[in-house]
Image (spheres, helix red, strand yellow):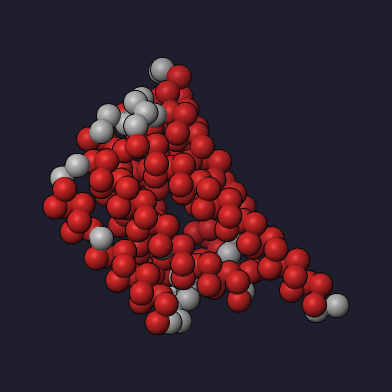
Amino acid sequence: MSFKEFLSAVAITLTFVAFYPYLRGILQGQVKPHVFSWVIWGSTTLVVFLAQLQAGGGAGAWPIGVSGAITLLIAVLAYFRRADLRITRADWFFLIAATSSLPLWYATSDPTWAVVVLTLVDLLGFGPTVRKVYAAPHSESLAFFGLLAARNGLVVMALESYSVATVLFPAAISAACLLLVCLILYRRRLLSATSR
């Protein structure tokens, strides 16, 4: 096993470590994911996985593929478990913006453009969750998004070739997860201080 494959295996392990309690939290009704965010994230993550493979990402792309499959499972659970189905106009905007950018990738047929477009789409997917976390910061798992930030850092290190097509997605998602962790901490602290 090469060092890159080892890093990929660690990143896949972190993926399962992050997702297991998140999935359990959904089933127990403690975590209430926003269905639109997870549909956007699952769809884009799987397409980015395919684009990374085409661009030579190798073992570093494997955790992205695993994550995409689990993310779509969470979208299904969010819908069927009625986690968070409150849909606002802003949420519809994020979903429409996300899905309307997919034909652009198809038209370019370039993995770099695919990853650029899909990274932007995936970042738009954070919109409904940011809105939800701002209002209800205890409705999301702090550890989950922290582990995903770390996992994506490992994904970057596990990549077998470095280019915009291979690095942009995991680096941007890592940064977005870190920002979401900061927002959750800030809003929890603020709500705790105002409830005293």
**Left or right: where does residue 78 sit relative to residue 138?**
left
User: In x, y percent, where is residue 148?
Assistant: 52, 47
Of residues 181 and 18, the one drawn nearer to the viewer in this rendering: 181
Say left or right for 122 vs 144.
Answer: left
Residue located at (40% from left, 62% from top): 124
Looking at the image, is 144 positioned above or below residue 86? above
The count of marks equals 0
Residue placed most toward the observer, 42 or 118 = 118
The residue under the point 46% across, 49% down is 173
Q: Residue 69, how many percent across, how many down?
A: 34, 51
Quadrant assignment for the N terminus: top left
Quadrant for the C terminus, please: bottom right
The quarter of the displayed image where residue 180 is located: bottom right
The answer to whether residue 165 of the structure is visible from this angle is yes
- Percent across and percent down for residue 36 are 39, 70
Q: Residue furthest top?
A: 2
Q: Position of residue 112 (x, y in %)?
A: 27, 41
User: Which residue is depicted at the point 64% across and 69% down?
Assistant: 138
Left or right: 185 as drawn, with respect to 129 = right
Relative height, residue 72 to residue 89 (above, below)? above
Residue sitting at the far right: 196
Please say if 82 is above or below 42.
below
Report the residue at 51% width, 46% height from top: 174
Q: Is residue 62 visible?
A: no
